[in-house]
Image (cartoon, rainbow, N blue to C red):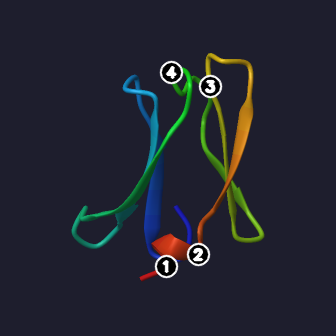
């Protein structure tokens, strides 16, 4: 959780940003594999690892509420 948003990875190959106060979807990003790692947020970047052997670095800015 960061800046009023919760970030989560899923078996449907997506990383989700949800507004913490009501669960509304702010954005999602599709990876090429199941998101297997925990999500980390640092300096405005969301990091997620997936089964395609990649770590994705996504801008969290779109998720600020």
Q: Are marks 2 and 3 in contact (CB under 8 Å)?
A: no
Q: Are marks 3 and 4 in contact (CB under 8 Å)?
A: yes
Where is residue 27? Give x, y as percent. Answer: 40, 60
Left or right position of 39 against 17: right
Report which residue position mark 4 lands on. 34
Report which residue position mark 1 lands on. 64
Whether residue 17 is visible: no
Where is residue 60? Give x, y as percent. Answer: 59, 67
C-alpha distance separating marks 4 and 2: 23 Å
The quadrant holding residue 20 is bottom left
Where is residue 19? Give x, y as percent. Answer: 34, 68
**Circle 3 crowding by C-alpha within 10 Å: few under 14, some 14–19, many from 20:** many
Report which residue position mark 3 lands on. 50
Closer to the camera, 49 or 42?
Answer: 49
**Circle 4 crowding by C-alpha within 10 Å: few under 14, some 14–19, many from 20:** some
> Which residue is located at x 25 percent, y 61 percent?
23
Precedes in sequence: disc 1 or disc 3: 3
Q: Are marks 1 and 2 in contact (CB under 8 Å)?
A: yes
Precedes in sequence: disc 4 or disc 2: 4
C-alpha distance separating marks 2 and 3: 21 Å
Query: Is 16 situated above or below 41?
Result: above
C-alpha distance separating marks 1 and 3: 24 Å
Closer to the camera, 9 or 57?
Answer: 57
Report which residue position mark 2 lands on. 61
């Amino acid at each position: 959780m960061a800046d009023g948003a919760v970030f989560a990875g899923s078996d449907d190959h997506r990383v989700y940003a949800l507004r913490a106060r009501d669960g509304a979807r702010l954005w999602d990003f599709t990876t090429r594999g199941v998101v297997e790692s925990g999500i980390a947020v640092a300096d405005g970047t969301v990091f997620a690892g997936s089964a395609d052997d990649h770590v994705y670095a996504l801008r969290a800015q779109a998720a600020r509420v």
